[in-house]
Image (cartoon, grey):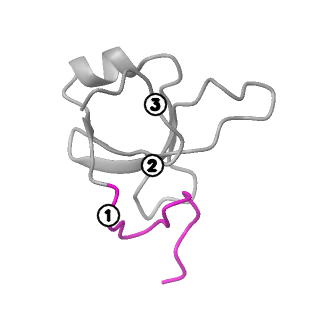
């Protein structure tokens, strides 16, 4: 994949975990990289803003946009299970 930065809505995986890149905060519209991991935990977020290169070096992957999460929706909100 030719991306050089995180993009809002991008589905990613790292070390067996999968997640989605959330919309950037209002005060920094071009600086996204907050990842909501697909776990049962209510607040499973990790800040990767500005670290796309490191994410890829650590064997992070960009997933197919059709990947279906188990616990979260594509926008990072919790699924009603």
Of circles 3 and 2, the one toward us is 3
Element at label 2: strand
* Mark earlier in primary sequence (1, 3): 3
Q: Could you say which is closer to the camera, residue 20 or residue 46? A: 20
The crowding category of the residue bearing disc 1, from other C-alpha atoms within 10 Å (few below 14, some 14 to 19, many at least 20), is: few
Q: Which residues are magenta?
A: 65-81
Secondary structure at badge 1 equals loop
Residue 45, x across and y down, in percent: 52, 43
Circle 1 or circle 2, nearest the eye: 1
Q: Is residue 61 above or below residue 27?
A: below
**Which tag, 3 or 2, sits closer to the chain's start?**
3
Give how far apart the Cα atoms at labels 3 and 2 are: 10 Å
Using a 10 Å C-alpha cutoff, classify the residue at mark 3 as few (fewer than 14 neighbours), some (14 to 19) or many (20 or more). many
Q: Which residue is mark 1?
A: 66
The answer to whether 15 appears left or right of 34 in the picture is: left
Q: Give the labeled residue for mark 2.
A: 20
Q: Position of residue 67 (x, y in %)?
A: 30, 62
Rendered view: 26 above or below 9: above
Give the residue pinned by disc 3.
6
The residue depicted at 44 percent of the width and 65 percent of the height is 40
The structure residue drawn at horizontal position 28% and vertical position 48%, both measured from the top left corner, is 17
Q: How would you rate the neighbour count of disc 2 (Cα within 10 Å): few for under 14, some for 14-19, many for 20 or more?
A: many
How many numbered circles does the render carry? Answer: 3
Q: Residue at x 32, y 50 (%)?
A: 18
* Main secondary structure of the magenta stretch: loop
Q: CA distance from mark 1 to mark 2?
A: 12 Å
Q: Position of residue 31 (x, y in %)?
A: 61, 23
């Amino acid at each position: 994949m030719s991306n050089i930065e995180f993009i809002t809505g991008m589905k990613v995986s790292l070390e067996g975990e999968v997640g989605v890149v959330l919309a950037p905060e209002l005060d920094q519209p071009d600086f996204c990289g907050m990842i909501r991991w697909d776990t049962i935990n209510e607040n499973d977020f990790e800040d990767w803003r500005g670290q796309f290169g490191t994410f890829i070096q650590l064997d992070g992957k960009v997933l197919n946009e059709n990947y279906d999460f188990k616990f979260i929706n594509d926008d990072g909100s919790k699924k009603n299970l």
